Structures are given as structure tokens and as C-alpha cells.
Amino acid sequence: MPISRLLLALFFVAAGVNHFLSPETYLKILPSHLKAGAALIWISGVAEVLGGIGILWTRTRWLAALGLILLLIAVFPANIYGALHGMNVAGWAVPSWLLWARLPFQPLLIAWVYFACWKADKPPP
């Protein structure tokens, strides 16, 4: 198994578990009009854990990669909302520049999932 895929799996499992350990952090970047915020945090955490585990096996890799890509697209508006409105983590105000600087990493994560999981399993022409 390529180390890139293993690191990606560990990243998503850790990020997903963090949704359950620190849900208040994620709730702070959700737009206020989303009333089911806690459920959305729980669902996205489960999706990240399952996706991270799923990319480790050939039989589930394609579906897990697709799910992770769709999840990354779906949560991007929350990241933009967090950058626009600021957020606090454990009483500490996250600097605005840091919230904006993290936005370009979302497409990079999508590319990482695609190249490490989806494209990697397609046979060469």
C-alpha cells in the first residue's frame, strides 16, 4: 500500500474522530441557519472515519474516495463561513489569515484523494 494512501486514511480517521471529541469547534463554523448542526457534525465525522477506512481496501476504495471528495465539496461552504465570520477554538480566536489560508487546502485534499485512491487504481492505457 502506498504511504500516501495510508497517511490520507490516517488523516481522515483522525479528523473524523475529532468531530466527536471537539464538536463545538465544528459547530462554530456552521452557518447559523443550519438547525441540525450537531447532527451534521456527527454525520460528517462518521463519513470521514468510514471514508478513511474505506480507502484502505481495493473493494471499497473507489466508493470511499468518491464519498470523501463529495464530503470535501459539501463542507467547503462551512469553511468559507468560518473565514468570513471568524471562530474561536478553546477560547482562542483563530487569526483571520489562518482561516483564509486553509481554504486552498480543500482542493488539494480533493486532488490527494483522487490521485492516491481513484486514479491510482485505474490500470494504465
Image (spheres, rainbow, N blue to C red):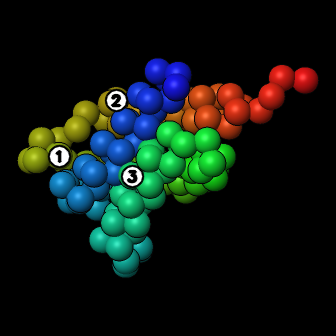
Instruction: Check disc 1: other Cα within 10 Å, few if <14, some if 14-19, many if 20+.
Output: few
Residue in front for this viewpoint, 84 or 16 = 16
Label of residue 89 in the image: 1
Residue 100 appears left or right of 60: left
Give the secondary structure at mark 2.
Answer: helix
Dots 2, 1 in contact, CB < 8 A? no
Q: Position of residue 97 (x, y in %)?
A: 34, 29
Can you say whether 35 is above or below 4 in the image? below
Label of residue 49 in the image: 3
Residue at x-position 23% and y-position 59%? 20
Residue 11 appears left or right of 113: left
Residue in front for this viewpoint, 39 or 67 = 67
Type of the residue with mark 2? Trp
- Which is more N-terminal, label 2 or label 3? 3
* Viewer-side label of 3, 1: 3
Q: Mark 2 points at which residue?
A: 97
Residue at x-position 68% and y-position 37%? 118
- Residue 37 visible here: no
* Viewer-side label of 2, 1: 1
* Quarter of image, res 14: top left
Give the secondary structure at mark 1.
Answer: strand
Instruction: Check disc 2: other Cα within 10 Å, few if <14, some if 14-19, many if 20+.
Output: few
Hey, which residue is sitting farthest bottom in the picture?
Answer: 35
Residue at x-position 52% and y-position 26%? 1
**Distance in Å between CA atoms under marks 2 and 1:** 15 Å
* Quarter of image, res 112: top right
**Distance in Å between CA atoms under marks 3 and 2:** 28 Å
Residue in front for this viewpoint, 73 or 87 = 73
**Distance in Å between CA atoms under marks 3 and 1:** 22 Å
Can you say whether 98 is above or below 74 in the image? above
Residue at x-position 19% and y-position 47%? 88
